[in-house]
Image (cartoon, rainbow, N blue to C red):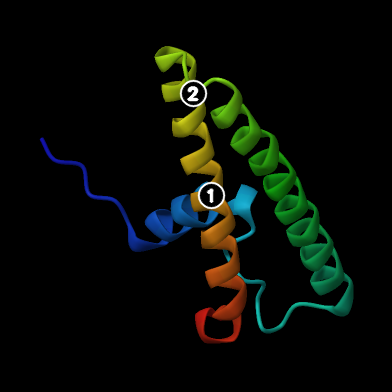
Amino acid sequence: MKKRIAPEKAILFTKLSVALTCSWPPSPLATKTQLLLFNALWCTTFVSSVTLFLPLMAAIYEYRKHPIVLGKTVSLASAVAQVVIKMMICRWQQKRFQ
């Protein structure tokens, strides 16, 4: 038996899955306090991601002779880079996404 999922539940799932990267824009009806909180969370998450990415780049250089550690570090660095790029794109397109 197939379960049918309502579009509202799919949108809610998507919204919750991107909450940590602050990719879902605030509502156009959001108050100034909500916008301030969203911007503060976005900046905190962005700075955190960038400050994690920099030591990962140093670790890639440091462990270039150890393939297992290098593979893990490259995987994590690419995931962090994807988060940073996604956050920048969503920030630039925020008005359109609303």
Check if mark 1's residue and mark 2's residue have beta carbons within 8 Å: no
Q: Nearer the viewer, residue 26 or 80?
A: 80
Q: CA distance from mark 1 to mark 2?
A: 19 Å
Residue at mark 1? 81
Q: Residues within 10 Å of mark 1 (few under 14, many from 20)?
A: some
Q: What element does badge 1 sit on? A: helix
Q: Earlier in the sequence, mark 1 or mark 2?
A: 2
Give the residue drawn at x 56%, y 43%: 80
Give the left or right position of residue 6, taking residue 24 as reference: left
Q: Which residue is mark 2?
A: 64
* Quarter in which the C terminus is drawn: bottom right
Q: Is residue 87 left or right of residue 55?
A: left
Residue 89 in the image: x percent, y percent?
53, 71
- Expressed as whole percent of the image width and height from the top left, the position of residue 96 reads 52, 86
Which residue in the rendered view is the most extreme toward the front?
65
Would you place residue 35 above or below residue 84 in this image? below
Image quarter where the N terminus lies is top left
Q: Which mark is residue 96?
A: none
The extreme left residue here reads: 1
